[in-house]
Image: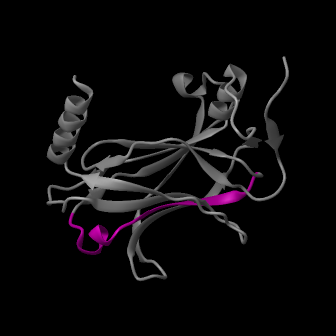
Amino acid sequence: MKQIYTLIDDGDAVVDFNHWQREIVLGERMTHSYFNTGGRSTGAAFVLVSDFFAEFQGTFSLITLEKSTDLTDKNWVNGNCETHTAQFEKITMPDGRTGMIARFPDFVFPQGIILPTPRKYSKATEEMRHARGMLVRYTINSDCDVPPNTMVEVALIPRTESMQVKSLNMTLQTPQQHRELMRERFAQLGI
C-alpha cells in the first residue's frame, strides 16, 4: 500500500488542529486535539485569550497536555500516554488583552506528519495522525454570567524562536447557554 504521508523529525514543531468543539462550556471538561506537522521541538504553552478573563472570578482545573508513548491508534483507549500537568496563570498579551497561559517546558513534541494537499482520506493516514496527536484537557469553573458571543482565542504554541502559531476562536458559554444553543441546532436539523 502506498504511503501518502511524510514523517518529520527535524526543525521546529508546527501545531495544527485535529478536531475541536466550537464552544468552551463553563464547568465541563474540555478536550482539544492537535497534531504536529513539524519537528520535535521541546517546550509548549497553551493559551486562552479573552477580555472575559480580565475580571474573571472562578477557578481552573489543572491542565494536562498528553501524547502517545507507543504511536499506535489504540494509545488513547489503553491510556498509554505521557501526561504533563500545569496551572493556568493570568498574563497580559502584547495587544493588551488578558490571557491565561499554562507552560509545559519539558514537553517534547511527537514526530511530525505531513499530509497531502488536498488531503486524501486513508485509514492508515488517519491512524498515523491520531497516533501522533496531542490532547489538551482542562475545566473552567465559574457561576458568573457570560455575555453572549464572548470569544476566546485558543492556541497550543511550540516554544521556539521561529514559533508558528495557529489559533482558533471559540465561544465561551454557561451550561444553560450551551443547552439553548444545542436545542436551536437540533431544531434546525429537525431533530
Q: Is residue 42 a member of the stretch shown in magenta? A: yes
**Lateral position of residue 180 relative to residue 83, left or right:** left
Q: Residue at x 31, y 72 (%)?
A: 51
**Lateral position of residue 168 relative to residue 4, left or right:** left
Front-lying residue, 16 or 100 = 16
Q: Residue at x 82, y 38 (%)?
A: 6
Q: Quarter of the image containing the C terminus?
A: top left
Q: Which residues are magenta?
A: 40-57
Residue 71 visible, this angle = no
Q: Is residue 160 a member of the stretch shown in magenta? A: no
Q: Residue 102: image x %, image y %? A: 48, 61
Q: Residue 77: image x %, image y %? A: 53, 23
Q: Residue furthest top?
A: 1
Q: Residue at x 80, y 30 (%)?
A: 4
Quadrant hosting residue 150: bottom left
Q: Residue at x 15, y 60 (%)?
A: 144
In this rendering, is residue 39 above or below 130?
A: below
Q: Residue 187: image x %, image y %? A: 19, 30
Q: Quarter of the image containing the N terminus?
A: top right
The colour scheme of the drawn protein is one colour
Q: Residue 89: image x %, image y %? A: 40, 68
Front-lying residue, 26 or 61 = 26
Residue 136 visible, this angle = yes
**Lateral position of residue 188 relative to residue 83, left or right:** left
**Lateral position of residue 170 relative to residue 114, left or right:** left
Q: How many marks?
A: 0
